[in-house]
Amino acid sequence: MPTPKIFTLFKNVNIPASGNAFGPSSGLDLSGYTNFRLVIRFDGPAGTRFTINELYGPAGAIDQLNSDIDTGTIDSLGSLNYRKKFDIFGPKNFSIRVFNNGAGPIKVNGSLYAV
């Protein structure tokens, strides 16, 4: 059984309006881990909508798969501390992608805690 670990996904990443960020760019191998907690800090215009997406499999390959984890909105103060426990579909080459569905830029910081 692997030792619990925190993986950095995003560190002060700016996402332009209607853009997205991908992290980590090298992907993660989460083989052996069974519980996952995602923590992302969003800063940007109040009301900005976002989507969090999970990618796994060989990057750029036809068999790379993705699924949406969640959607949300930045609160009226212009920030949101997002936390969620979730299941992963594939442990190899795992990454998270955040979509900015708003008209202004947002900043994200995020990590994944794996047990």
Image: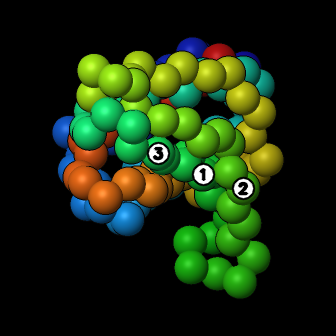
Disc 3 crowd, CA 10 A, few/some/many (<14, 14-19, 20+): some
Q: Could you give the CA–CA distance between mark 3 and mark 2, rounded to whole angstroms?
A: 17 Å
Residue at 71% x, 83% y: name it. Answer: 62
At which x and y percent is residue 30?
64, 39
Location of residue 111 (image quadrant): top left
Q: Could you give the CA–CA distance between mark 1 and mark 2, rounded to whole angstroms?
A: 6 Å
Between marks 3 and 1 in the image, the one whose residue lies nearer the viewer: 3
At which x and y percent is residue 89?
79, 47
Picture disc at residue 49 = 3
At which x and y percent is residue 72?
54, 36
- Seen in the image, is 57 located left or right of residue 59? right
Disc 1 crowd, CA 10 A, few/some/many (<14, 14-19, 20+): some
- Seen in the image, is 6 located left or right of residue 61? left
Picture disc at residue 67 = 2
The residue nearer to you, when weighing 100 against 20, is: 100
Picture disc at residue 53 = 1
- Determine if residue 110 is in view: no
Picture disc at residue 34 = none
Q: Amino acid at mark 1?
A: Asn
Whichever of callouts 1 and 2 sits on the residue coming sooner in the sequence is 1
Q: Secondary structure at mark 1?
A: strand
Q: Amino acid at mark 3?
A: Arg
